[in-house]
Image: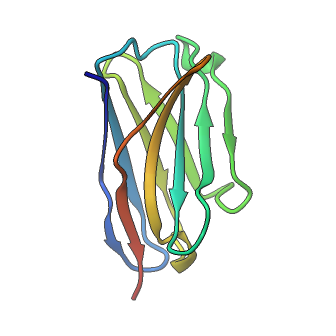
Amino acid sequence: QVQLVESGGGLVQPGGSLRLSCAASGFTFRPHVMSWYRQAPGKERELVATITSADRSADRSTHYGDSVKGRFTISRDNARNTIYLQMNSLKPEDTAVYYCKAHYYAYEYWGQGTQVTVSS
């Protein structure tokens, strides 16, 4: 059974940091392109960050949405079938449900999401 399980969300003050994790199981993790998306209330789901599937970290490419560039960092650990999203300098507008996605050709899997709330 394919599973993507996000964790690490919560309530944080503006300017703070959080680290999200997404643990994958039930499929061959390594060749999948992995992404984080988010969806705020009343808004469409948007891409936060993507990381490609190369075995060596030096060979992987990353892409970030304009609103998070320079503040968020995506990474993956193929040995643990896990991706991460390090979020720094958080702003109230980062408040959303954050989702993990695995993508390989026509195949696409989504996690159930984790809530991130940035508020004082």
Which residue is located at x 60 percent, y 51 percent? 48
Left or right of 116 on screen, residue 101: right
Q: Residue 12, percent across and down?
A: 36, 74
Q: Name the foreground residue: 38 vs 13.
A: 38
Coloring scheme used: rainbow
Q: Residue 18, percent across and down?
A: 39, 59
Q: Name the foreground residue: 110 vs 37.
A: 110
Q: Residue 10, percent across and down?
A: 30, 66
Compared with 34, 78 (above or below) is: above
Which residue is located at x 34 percent, y 47 percent? 112
Q: Going by the picture, which residue comes out furthest to the bottom? A: 120
Q: Name the foreground residue: 64 vs 111.
A: 111
Q: Going by the picture, which residue comes out furthest to the right? A: 66
Left or right of 105 on screen, residue 98: left
**Total numbered labels:** 0
Left or right of 62 on screen, residue 113: left
Q: Residue 27, percent across and down?
A: 35, 15
**Image quarter hosting the C terminus:** bottom left
Compared with 9, 85 (above or below) is: above
Which residue is located at x 63 percent, y 22 percent? 60
Q: Name the foreground residue: 63 vs 57.
A: 63
Left or right of 11 on screen, residue 73: right
Which residue is located at x 69 percent, y 52 percent? 65
